[in-house]
Amino acid sequence: MDFIDHIKDINWSDIADKIYSKNSSDVERALAADRPSVDDFMALISPAASGYVERMAVMSNRLTQKRFGKTVQLYVPLYLSNYCENQCVYCGFNSGLKIPRKVLTIEEVKEEAIAISKMGFKHILLVTGESSKKADVDYLEEVFKTIKPYFSLISIEVQPLSQNDYERLLKVGLHTVYIYQETYNSNTYSNYHLKGKKSSYSGRLDTYEKLGRAGVYKMGLGILAGLEDWRVDTLFTALHLRYLQKRYWRTKYSISFPRLRPNAGGYEPSFVMTDKDLAQLIFAYRIFDNDVELALSTREDRLFRDNMINLGVTSMSAGSKTNPGGYAQDNDDLEQFSVNDDRTPVEVAEAIKDHGYEPVWKDWDSSLQ
């Protein structure tokens, strides 16, 4: 039974009522639990826990150091293409927008890889708009072979692929796949995803099953904060995480926390997540799951990112460009969204050191895993 079968009878409004009905006693019980349950997670993300954020931060710091040590892994996204076949109202790559489009040639990919490797990175995230015509698995495989000499860990955030395609990319060095449901609210999902394969709620969810069956080393989950009530959406994410951990227990998991940022489409968030809200959520996830990796991108500003260095986050992007050709060619006209932390990788690494932590540029080689 797949995850969609597990949640088909769970009512969004009922979950919201449960979260907003939590009280201080529920929060105290959650903080005292040896192995917090999903119900405990509800309490930790509820408004009732807003007065416990400092206490949660202390717990998050202790639990993260115990599991991951005083380290933060650095990674960088390489945008290969901004072609997309979907019409998502919140995205700067929306196929309905009349913007310049580009897909990097293999030679341009190599130029970008060289430029990025000179910054010190050994962990790279390949990103495309979701276009199987412009960036299919043949293209991705060639990209992998081209950049593999420069990087020890290669992740992707591209259109959903078949199980066979994921298995094919695993053979050439694929490590992690990030795939976001954006929102778990099946009643409103179609309001944000108008056309394209991404408009299928069930089809999107099924991608995680394909990843699990393919044996991908790590998969990343997350919602786009601003579409729906973040508390309810992240509760469904936690349910999804627990399901995947039980069914595909050999796989590692990561949670990301993207908030809507300005883009060419000009979409404004319907629900606001404040910095305090995001901090509470990060601490709640760490208390809920000591092993899950927590990633923070350059969507967030430098002050918030610096404050999170020793409070639960285990990986951060740095020096990010969200447009194809952004490193060697530096053309911002094609960007997916504007970044909020524009420091260089060296500056981010120094900030990590200033907090008494070690910036990690390279994860373990797959041969050692």
Image: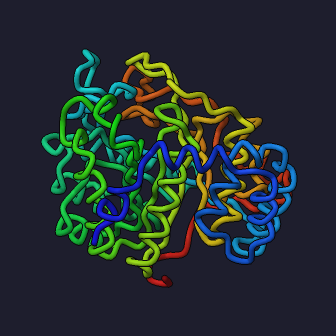
Indicate left or right for 335 with 349 as reference.
left
Indicate left or right for 92 with 38 as reference.
left
Q: Position of residue 11 (x, y in %)?
A: 42, 49
- Taking the spot 45% from the left edge, 58% from the top edge, the residue there is 220
Q: Position of residue 24 (x, y in %)?
A: 81, 52
Q: Position of residue 154 (x, y in %)?
A: 41, 61
Indicate left or right for 22 with 141 as reference.
right
- Taking the spot 59% from the left edge, 50% from the top edge, the residue there is 18
Determine which quarter of the picture holds residue 288.
bottom right
Determine which quarter of the picture holds residue 145.
bottom left
Q: Position of residue 6 (x, y in %)?
A: 35, 64
Determine which quarter of the picture holds residue 72.
bottom right
> Is the residue 206 above or below the residue 230 in the image?
below
- Taking the spot 17% from the left edge, 40% from the top edge, the residue there is 134
Residue 236 visible? The answer is yes
Q: Nearer the viewer, residue 359 or 255?
A: 255
Colour pattern: rainbow
